[in-house]
Amino acid sequence: MNINNKVDDFFFAENSVSGEPDYGLADTFVRTAEAFAKATYQSVYIIDYYRKNFLYVSPNPLFLCGMSADKVKSLGYQFYLDHVPADEVGMLLEINQAGFSFINKLPPAERNKYTISYDFHIVNGHEKLLINHKLTGLAYQPDGSVWLGLSVVSLSVHSKAGHITMHCRDKAGYWEYDLALHGWEEHAAPVLNKTEKAILTLSIQGLTISAIAEQAHLAVDSVKSARRRLFEKLEVNNISEAISYATNYKLL
C-alpha cells in the first residue's frame, strides 16, 4: 500500500466537474459499457470524476487482482494505492495531471476525439502484471469538463511501465509524454508500405513466415527482411509489439 498518497491526490482543479451531472443518464452509460465488455471480453471500467469513484467495473478478471468487480468498484481509486507499486503511483499522478492539462487546452467540442494510453503494473501478492490503460472521455458537462471516463484495460506488450501517448481519432500522428522532461512531444505516425501491411495483417491471422511468404507471393528471406525493417521503423522488438503498435496508431 502507498502510505504517502491519498485518493484526493488524483483529483485537482483541472479535472474538476462543473455542476452536478445528470445521473439519470448514468444507467445508459453503464449498460453500454457492460454490453461492450460482454461482446469483446475486454476489461473496462467507468471513472466518475464528480463523485471521485468508479461508476462501473466489468467482471473480467484481468484488472481485478483476485477480487470481485463489486469490490474493486467499492474501492475506487484506493485500488491504485493498494495494488500499484509506489513509484508508479507517482507516475499515474503525473499522467493524470498532464493528460487533463492537455485536454483542457482543446476546444470543448474537440475533447471527445482524444484517448490517452499508458502502461503500469498491478500487484496481487507476489504476482506483478504489466497492463495497458486506454482512457477516453465518455460524458462531458456543457463547458467541456469530463464527467465520466471510459478505461479499457489489456495486457501490455512492453517490458516496463510508461509508454504514455495521446491519440486523436482525426489525426495520423500522436503525442508522447516524456517523464524526464515533463512535457508532450508531437510525432508523425510511421507510414507502412504494402508489404509491411500484408505482413502485419497475415501475422494477425496467425500465419507463419513461410505461410506469409506464400500468401504474399514473396520469398521467405524477403519476408524476414521486411519484418526486420518493419521492427526498426516501429521501434519494436517482435511481431506482437508490431501488431499492437499498428493497431494503436491506426496504421492498418
Image (spheres, rainbow, N blue to C red):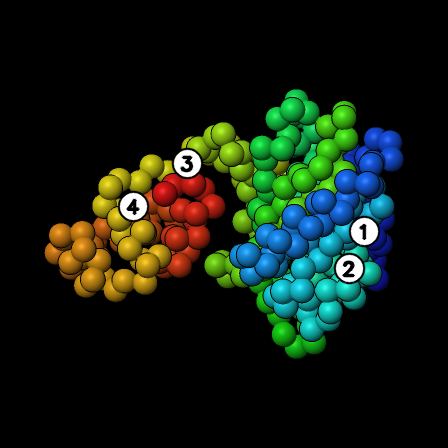
Report whether 244 appears left or right of 151. Answer: left
> Residue 105 placed where, x, y %?
67, 25
**Residue 53 tag number:** 1
Pick the front one: 236 or 33: 33
Whether pointer 3 and pointer 2 mark residues with C-beta atoms closer than 8 Å, the reply is no
Whether pointer 4 and pointer 3 mark residues with C-beta atoms closer than 8 Å, the reply is no
Residue found at x 65% / y 48% = 32
Image quarter in which the N terminus is found: bottom right
Amino acid marked by disc 4: Lys
Circle 4 sits on which residue? 197
Query: Nearer the N terminus, badge 4 or badge 1?
Result: 1
Query: Nearer the N terminus, badge 4 or badge 3?
Result: 3
> Could you classify mark 3 by the number of other residues whose Cα lies within 10 Å: few (under 14), some (14-19), or many (20 or more)?
some
Circle 3 sits on which residue? 189
The mark closer to the camera, 4 or 3, is: 4
> Could you classify mark 4 by the number of other residues whose Cα lies within 10 Å: few (under 14), some (14-19), or many (20 or more)?
some
> Residue 213 placed where, x, y %?
17, 57
Query: Nearer the N terminus, badge 1 or badge 3?
Result: 1
Whether pointer 2 and pointer 1 mark residues with C-beta atoms closer than 8 Å, the reply is yes
